[in-house]
Image (cartoon, rainbow, N blue to C red):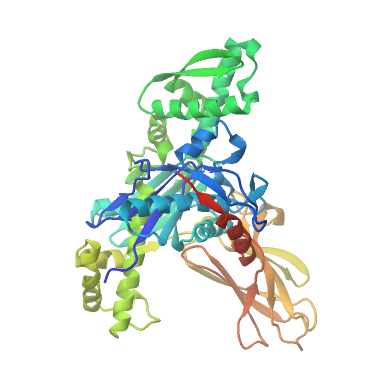
Amino acid sequence: MAGTKVFGIDLGTTYSCIAQVDEYGRPDVIRNIESQPTTPSVVLFDESGAAGDGGPAGSFVVGTQAKRQSRIRPDDVARLVKRHMGASDWRFVAHDVEYSAASVSSLVLKALAADAQRATGTPVTDVVITVPAYFGDEERKATKLAGELAGLNVVDIINEPTAAAFAYGFAQDGQSASTVLVYDLGGGTFDTTVIRLDGNDITVVATDGDHELGGADWDNEIVRYLAQKFVQEQPDAGDPLDDVYDEQELLTAAEDAKLALSGRESVDVLVVHGGKRCSVTFTRATLEEITAPLLQRTVDLTGSVLQRAKEKGVDTIDLCLLVGGMSKLPAVSRRLGEAFGLTCRLADPDLAVAKGAAVYGQKKALEREVREELVASGKLRPDQSLDAAATGDLEAAAAASASAAGLTTSSVVDLVRTRVTDVTSRGFGIFAEDRGSAVAAFLAHQNDALPIEVKRTFYTISDDQAEVDIRVFEQGTGVESTRIEDNKVIVAGAISGIPAGHPRGTPVEVSFEMGRDQTIKVTATHVGASEPLVLRVTAGVGSESMKTEESAKVSLLKQRD
């Protein structure tokens, strides 16, 4: 009874990868066409016909070749796009065509899926995609849209630290309960999350992060340092940062130097500009000195999360899992040990997130299969959760899927019964007209456990009012603020269908629901309406109009190796 395989994708800022659970039941990262486990999240756009103009289809290249071309054709190469996910006004312009961050990211996903299908012979249709825990609603919608534009069925969006915990929990295979801190410092984003692992329960206690803090910022500091050293030694040659091509060369050199210093104390870097050259000896000590403020930002955020966890009664961390390529820097574990006394372990930093997503994807696939079997056999009603199934019935249904999945029946039961309890990454609420005045009301707070359902009563401001304008906002700063300008509107629309004949001041009860995947639903109940009223939204990231527009552009692009 083998169903559709669900692949796990780590869609990273600088590198991405795709994983599956193999025939032996183990998570395995699938190598790309270049036999590498990770693919640079870089896209090169070649000649392109704009959507609908009848011109020739353009082409795109993803990965190492695109990254190399950034030195020669920087204007045609999109990189660090993940930092713009959910930004409705950001566009990458290539050959007079504007692409949203979701569109560019969809090309990376297409390349990953094509490589995986080529390597495994299995069509890639269903996927779980990971996102930073600190991603908000718009960023999550954009990530899902990217998957849809790539022709994929996005089964779920899972937070990167949660995926890493899945990979770690899978490797532990039933060992004693523990509380871990997942410190995830990647190429462009940072998350720090306290997670409790106890049997079949994975419980996120607290999380925080910065999606504009990562390895790219370390690279920029190295580039500035190398450029300064060059100017000091070759003052007549000018500044290499004034030349876009030489700046790209410096960026590549910075990345290579940073990688080398993970295992060495020093490296020599050649800087060339204006017909002059300079050899710079770059040491690990210098790297740590010039990037100390960046590392301190991660330490400060980690301290904040540990404090929030303590306020929830969790004051002991058994282990710190280091995830993300940047966590391999020796300064990271040393600084965390100094600041918090943490015992740190590198947890397959480049691949753990994709592997965990694959395990979670298998969980989703097995849940679907087991549920279908239980419902078909009359052991479970369609409206019941798997928790309602009798143990014997669940084991019998699981046995049908176990052999095909390369797992034992007990392993399938354990995976299906694994519960993930996540928290909100930010506070959410609504702006509305309440008795004639604009109000900002937080209905969910950062680190509240999911799912959430909160109700609040508002009042009409005129007789026979037919609709109520509602704006859903997301916390825009590190701490909650009731000031409207400190928060970001993510959904705006009208609750319509209010019956006539009711005076000003009639109560309207608004229900705010946030699911386990942090998707938002807003409904309202009016005394004169027999059915709940639903918020109508017509624009924004993930809207049908945006999907149609971006799909038309992406469909004209053909991938080439």
Image location of residue 187, percent across then percent down: 48, 39
Instruction: Please report the residue visible at 60 percent of the width from the left and 75 percent of the height from the top.
Output: 523
Quarter of the image with the N terminus is bottom left
Instruction: Please report the residue visible at 66 percent of the width from the left and 55 percent of the height from the top.
Output: 487
Q: Is 502 rendered above or below residue 111?
A: below
Image location of residue 174, percent across then percent down: 23, 57
Query: Is 396 positioned to the left or the right of 266 in the image?
Result: left
Tell me, yes or no, if residue 314 can be seen here: no
Query: Is 484 positioned to the left or the right of 84 in the image?
Result: right
Query: Is 376 positioned to the left or the right of 87 in the image?
Result: left
Foreground of the two, 196 or 269 = 269
Q: Is 313 rendered above or below residue 70?
A: below
Residue 345: quadrant of the picture:
top left
Tell me, yes or no, if residue 468 can be seen here: yes
What is the number of callouts on the image?
0
Instruction: Please report the residue visible at 42 percent of the width from the left and 50 percent of the height from the top.
Output: 112
Image location of residue 249, percent across then percent down: 53, 26
Image location of residue 425, percent across then percent down: 51, 55
Q: Is 536 rendered above or below residue 215?
A: below
Foreground of the two, 287 or 450 = 287
Quarter of the image with the C terminus is top left
